Image: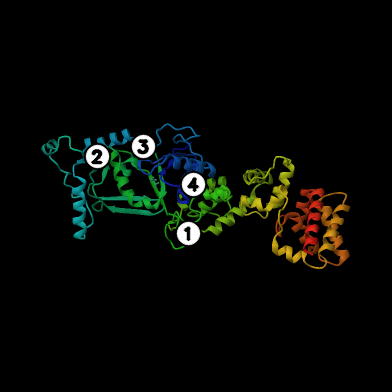
Amino acid sequence: MSNVRVRFAPSPTGFFHIGNAKTALYNWLFARGSGGTFILRLEDTDVERSKDEYAEVLCDCLQWLGLDWDEGPAFAHVPAKGDYAPYRQSQRGELYRGEANRLLDESKAYKCFCSKEELDAERERAAAEKRPPRYNRKCRNLSPEELGAKGDAPFAIRFKVMEGVTEIDDVVQGIVRTDNKEVDDFIILRPSGDPIFHLAVVVDDGLMKVTHVIRGDDHLTNAARHVMLFKALGYDVPIFCHHPLVHDEKGQKYSKRLPGANVLDWRKDGYLPEALINYLALLGWTPSDGRELLSLDELAEQFSIERLSASPSRFDLKKAQWLNGQHMRMLSVEALRDRVLPVLDKAGFDTSGKSSEWLTRMAAICQEKLRTLNDIVPYTDFFFVEPVAYEEKPARKLWSGADALDVMRTIRDTMLALEVWSADALKQRYEEVAESTGQGVGHYIHPTRLALTGKSVGPGLYELAELLGKETCVARIDRAIVYIEQLG
Ligand code: GLU
């Protein structure tokens, strides 16, 4: 195992957004491609907004996507693992307080006794004078006497920002320089003893020996403060890699309300996780050979943070759908069968009476047509339940003509006369019948399909007829004949 250690550090405060999935993926790919360690850490210090159920959804989504982690906290069905536990920030309070006090002892931080009212008033004054809101450093240089006089008054701990320039050589963004004058003496520990995000994230990355911080560029503005903290705490500064957020068509951050924002919706809609992964990988990274269709293993092999793009990419639902269709076709028929079975079960179809061979054939005859796993339901429902109605428009078109009944009776006779019930034999007979009557074969195929499936589109007719079996096919043709007779 290499010494690469990366982490995905989501806050369980809402559903699992595709932007989060992209960050998780890039970390995972980088870890897997470099033989490193992928850490899952929950940034759940916001007690109001963090919820266990969101953490469980997160765990579920990562598992569905196939992004396994080497270290992380316990979830309902997953035990904790890793040597740097706990991996939930809410359980690491003592560590943060210890490190904040260390900074205090080393005079790299100071106690701030300013009340909320005082700070608010200061902020308002700054706004009125059109100055940026800055802490006036009132408590930065309190004398020992002044400090003593405060007794046990509540205090926050503030980081002492030193003069100079903080430079980050970001893998994606290049050199980012911040004049420390632009950075306030920021609070790291609240009077309650709770850490501020910046302290928690740096202490965790430092103590967990994180080597690369790969995260969304919404955190770029935090990075200078983080680097100051890393240095002040004596930790190794990791390599930063701030990749652009996912944007919508208007170039805005992809809103939670837009279709496809929630990873769970992709699963619900029958998308393959490998297709979503493939799509998210391309949404900010280009493989060196320009190929678009890649498996998870191929992605891990080819991925490099150097090829991450600095410009945001726009979410393109159509492309994701296209990729899904491609991945559906890449599955072996057995794999496709196993993936569609739960979908059919969920739709209430009883597949238990069918042999595995039959189900494999069923999957095979649909494979080219399916865009999502859920498409299997309208494509195969007639195998499990008798069609209750015929699609209206095709029924009118195909069955209101003068020869409709004759056509159906010919079909019935053709079927009954067949000794070997197979797709090939059916095809041969249909073509012979068409030729003998001088009609196109469609003249017989379309009404047969409507009678057997109730629909005008679906899997190949001869193949589905073979799978339905002779008896069922003849019975359904009979039913259609009765239906047409009643029309007349
Ligand atoms: N918890 C932060 C977020 O969800 C991640 C912070 C980080 O990666 O450093 O945006």
Mark 4 vs mark 3: give the one in front. 3
The amino acid at mark 3 is: Ser
Residue in the foreground of this view, choosing between 362 and 392: 392
Mark 2 touching mark 3, by CB under 8 A?
no
Tell me residue 368's x, y (percent).
Answer: 68, 54
Residue at image mark 1 = 314
Q: Pointer 2: residues within 10 angstroms few (<14), some, or many (20+)? A: some
Tell me residue 62's x, y (percent).
Answer: 50, 43
Residue at image mark 4 = 25
CB at disc 2 and ligand 1 closer than 8 Å: no
Left or right: residue 140 versus residue 373 is: left
The amino acid at mark 2 is: Pro
Residue at image mark 2 = 191
Left or right: residue 462 versus residue 54 is: right
How many angstroms separate mark 2 from mark 1 (CA)? 42 Å
How many angstroms separate mark 2 from mark 4 (CA)? 37 Å
Residue at image mark 3 = 90
